[in-house]
Image (cartoon, grey):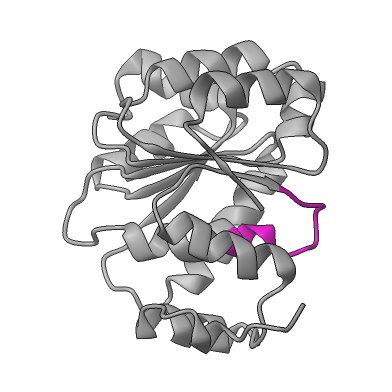
């Protein structure tokens, strides 16, 4: 398979600057397949090991679709652990470095919820959350999901192993039906396949 450079993917020049600052030139296979699939608006199932560059595979096209002029939450990324939520948020922030007005917030348990609520009130377009803490905010009404256009489930198999499957169903049920959904997982255990069948429409496999 021939390599694809990021500057061949018709990306926003501001995102390309962020990618360049991070030292990325050529897309990894999951990025080369995933970015165009996500940009086309289709639902996506990505089977990728950690370390293959999958955060950028969804992070780059997600940033392409964000409306920086609106302070509404437009993207929810579900992460199994606090560490991963922070890591994904850091990487997306770096990619969005030159995109003025785009706010990225990780929300997770073990951090003072009032700090998160304060940050959310200021308007955050992209939230990366662990399932438990995201549900907590949903119950409190401190996260408005009515304008969410993209949902990413990251490390799906880890979520299953950690017993989050029911939480994920609850979160997915609270999202607008008209949205783009992406599942990324190193393996595809049966519960993830079942979730995908229930919640994804005609997904592209990358």
> What percent of the width, then of the height, locates residue 8?
51, 86
Whole-percent x and y of residue 129?
53, 37
Quadrant location of the N terminus in the rendered image: bottom right
Residue found farthest to the left:
69
Label tally? 0
Q: Residue at x 69, y 62 (%)?
A: 30
Lateral position of residue 193 relative to residue 167, left or right: right
Residue 139 magenta-highlighted: no
Please state if 94 lies on the left or on the right of 3 as rendered.
left
* Residue 92 in view of the camera: no
State the residue at coordinates (78%, 63%).
52
The answer to whether residue 76 is above or below residue 168 is below
Is residue 54 part of the magenta span, yes or no? yes
Q: Is residue 13 visible?
A: yes
Say whether residue 182 is left or right of residue 55: left
- The magenta segment: 47-57
In the depicted structure, whether residue 63 falls above or below residue 83: below
What residue sits 35% from the left and 34% below the top? Answer: 117
Where is residue 60 shown, x and y percent of the image? Answer: 49, 66
- Asked where in the image residue 176 lies, by quadrant, the reply is top left
Identify which residue, 121 or 130, lies in the foreground: 130
Measured from the top left, where is residue 82 in percent x and y?
Answer: 66, 39
Residue drawn at point x = 63 percent, y = 70 percent: 32
């Amino acid at each position: 398979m021939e390599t694809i450079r990021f500057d061949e993917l018709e990306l926003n020049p501001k995102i390309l600057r962020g990618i360049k600052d991070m030292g990325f030139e050529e897309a990894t296979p999951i990025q080369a397949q995933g970015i165009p699939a996500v940009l086309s608006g289709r639902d996506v199932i990505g089977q990728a090991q950690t370390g293959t560059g999958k955060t950028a595979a969804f992070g780059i096209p997600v940033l392409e679709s964000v409306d920086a002029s609106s302070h509404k939450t437009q993207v929810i990324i579900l992460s199994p652990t606090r560490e991963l939520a922070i890591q994904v948020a850091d990487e997306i922030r770096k990619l969005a470095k030159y995109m003025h007005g785009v706010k990225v917030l990780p929300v997770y348990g073990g951090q003072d919820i009032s700090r998160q609520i304060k940050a959310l009130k200021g308007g955050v377009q992209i939230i990366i959350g662990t399932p438990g803490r995201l549900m907590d905010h949903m119950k409190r009404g401190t996260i408005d999901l009515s304008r969410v256009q993209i949902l990413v489930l990251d490390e799906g198999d880890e979520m299953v192993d950690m017993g989050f499957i029911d939480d994920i169903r609850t979160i997915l049920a609270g999202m607008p039906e008209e949205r783009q959904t992406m599942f990324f997982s190193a393996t595809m255990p049966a519960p993830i396949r079942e979730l995908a069948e229930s919640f994804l429409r005609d997904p592209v496999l990358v």
